[in-house]
Amino acid sequence: MALIVQKYGGTSVGSVERIRLVAERVARARAEGHSLVVVVSAMSGETNRLLALGRELAGSPDPREMDALVATGEQVSAALVAIALSDRGVPARSLLGHQVRLMTDDAFTKARIKAIDDSRLLKVLDAGRVAVVAGFQGVDEEGNITTLGRGGSDTTAVAIAAALGAEVCEIYTDVDGVYTADPRVCPSARKIERISYEEMLELASLGAKVLQLRSVEVAMKYGVAVHVRTSFSEETGTMVTKEDASLESIVVTGVTSDRNTAKVTIRGVVDQPGIAAAVFEALAQRHVSVDMIIQNVSEDGRTDLTFTVAQDDADTACAIAAEALVEKREVLVDPDVVKVSIVGLGMRSHAGVAARMFRLLADASVNIQAISTSEIKVSCLIEARHADLAVRTLHDGFLG
């Protein structure tokens, strides 16, 4: 019998009836003799409701107080699931982030896990109970409630699985696995049975919504087996696992698009050492993550510096960039862009993949504004209006 960590997303606990179904699934696994830690998200729509309340009261609410506010969503879910389990005769105990002692840094709204004290969890499990943990939240060294960013319950679950040495971390969501593309955009998309940590990491960072990026990072670092599946059926889903020869034989594993992208351009900066460093150091200090970076050829000693950030960070990035420059320059934002990407381990050993991607987009009359690559991915920045067309074109071209 095994120790299993199960995580249930917002749609899986979105109503009393669905919570009962979760309790039934957990009860079946426990009846098979397994020890279980269950990590839950807030009920579907609850986090958005709480965020809207805070923003209705203040245009820029204090991040610390927003974390204290939105963390209550997971508290409700954890208690309800524990109640449902107890009603079925399954002893359970709900635990919040600070009770688990899931320690984080103090980057409110996007905190990172530093350590987990597993003693409380082990005590609950040793007593024969199911531990029901509120996902998405932790506590910093000052005792403040912190949250891990959107999708943070995935990271909570994988980190707990790593800390406890669980046999598997099952991520239950509203889709039945990882697909070669978004099925809502690309009808020919297929479910992937097995995918490497590296490929899943790239897909998560490039807009795939199935797993949070940091959860994949933790899984890869500690070798946690992750099974992505749906809570609405008994079907097997997608196993996220270590790289092997069979996975390397596939040139392109998936196509994805990231609509949460904005392009920031600083016009006419002086082309000299230290300018880029000043801008990007200032962004890093404010926890603004930068993706693509493009610097144009210098003309008359000046150049344009362009980079992409998440849309929510666009205004902040503009203000930071303007402050970081001694000489004030025009800073422009373009939110109407999308990053489309192809990902696959086989790209390491196959020439011409990027060229084929560019030709496919060109034949579809999709203009490329910027390009970035790694060993196993190629990404192109394009106009947002071409996003769906680009995904279907690339999927049909590489995986059709």
Image: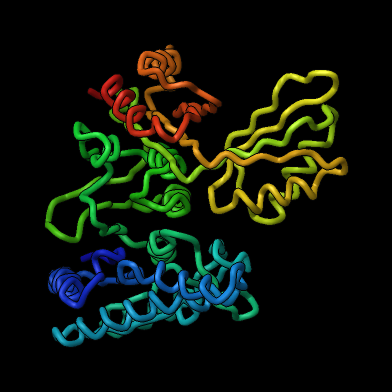
Q: Quadrant of residue 391?
A: top left
- The one nearer the camera, 26 or 125, is 26
Quadrant of the snapshot with the C terminus: top left
Viewer can see residue 243: yes
Q: Position of residue 310 (x, y in %)?
A: 54, 47
Q: Can see residue 7?
A: no
User: Could you say which quadrant of the image residue 153 lies in?
Assistant: bottom left
Image check: 88 left or right of 178? Answer: left
* Above or below, comparing residue 183 to residue 399 in the picture: below
Residue that appears at 20% across and 50% down? 176
Look at 27% across and 37% down and name the residue there: 185
List x then y, in percent, for residue 179: 26, 40
Q: Is residue 318 above or below residue 386?
A: below
Seen at 47% across and 53% down, the residue is 214
Horizontal arrangement in the rendering, residue 366 relative to residue 45 (left or right): right
| Horizontal arrangement in the rendering, residue 82 relative to residue 158 (left or right) | left
Q: Residue at x 34, y 67 (%)?
A: 45
The quadrant the N terminus occupies is bottom left
Percent x, y of residue 174: 24, 56
- Measured as percent of width and height from the top left, residue 251 is found at 34, 22
The residue sitting at the right extreme is 326
